[in-house]
Amino acid sequence: MRVICDAPGQTCNRLWTYVASLADCIVNHHKMVVLFFDYTIVDFPNFRKSKYVYFPFYHPWYLNRGNGWNNFKGATWKLTHSEKWDKRFKKLGFRKGWDTRNEIENIPAAMKELQHIFTPREEICKEAENKLKGIKENCDIVIGVHIRRGDYATWNDGIFFYSHKEYRGFMEAAMEVFPGKKVGFFISTNEPVPQDVFDGLQVDMHNNGSAILDLHTLSLCDYIMGPYSTFSRWASFIGEKPLCWLDHVGQSMHFSKVLSFFRMEDGTTLKDW
């Protein structure tokens, strides 16, 4: 049995902490224990109820009343940012899932079950399907575009911070990869985008929606593109859809599936971004 004791954090970072241990449990028929989690657990009922996973501190009657979630988050922060507790966790053989991302040997055999476990709740799945229905009816190919700005203005010295016009340029370049096909785009972004930037393109946009909804919608697209991020990396992995990293303006557009956190189907080894 594995015990995972990472601190909760950004949604996709946390999802990636579970993959290797879950794959091991699925293939070898045993169970993992997840000590700490965030509120997005309610969006993944198959994960919460999986026979391969046990959440000893998931008690809805406490978490959903009063300050339950905030109290749990506060206690979690103290326990996962304490040298004393870190030593105790290590002594007990508990692991940080973030450190298991290279343990990929069981992922191929466990992939179908992983996809089942990480299917969001029914309402999210239906909304994502409805979101894409119109654009899929009118286009041969739908490319999901993850527009990530905000913190990317400063992260890594802003190397992957692009203007909206530059994103349009990436989209136009992607269309050239599929000559003779009508290409539409689903845009996932957490900020307002000037509507005229994408005039003339077949675009459906989701601004400031649920992160899990955007994530699942991206995974349902035929292809995905975006700057280096665990978000689009997860959508490509769990949806088994080819991804194009937006590395620099003027690049050639190349799509390949993400097979694990550090590996792509074309043999590319990804940096720890």
Image (tube, rainbow, N blue to C red):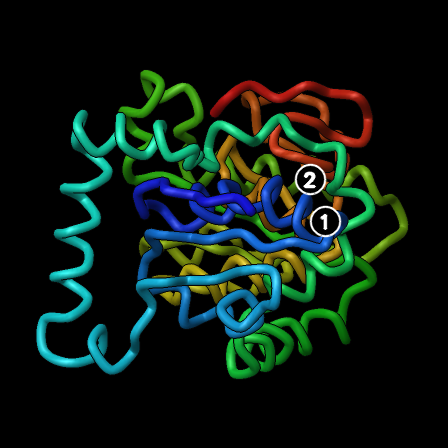
Residue drawn at x 70%, y 37% as measured from the top left: 258
Q: Residue 87: where, in percent of width, then height?
A: 26, 26
Hey, which quadrant is residue 89 in on the image? top left
Is residue 240 among the parts visible in the rendering? no
Residue drawn at x 70%, y 27% as measured from the top left: 263
- Residue occupied by mark 1: 223
Amino acid of disc 1: Tyr
Hey, which quadrant is residue 135 in on the image? bottom right
Q: Secondary structure at mark 2?
A: strand
Q: Residue 3: where, in percent of width, then height?
A: 45, 45
State whether residue 87 is above or below residue 203.
above
The answer to whether residue 217 is left or right of residue 151 is right
Amino acid of disc 2: Leu
Front one among 60 and 167: 60
- Residue occupied by mark 2: 243
Query: Label 2 crowding class (10 Å Cα cut-off): few <14, some 14-19, many 20+?
Result: many
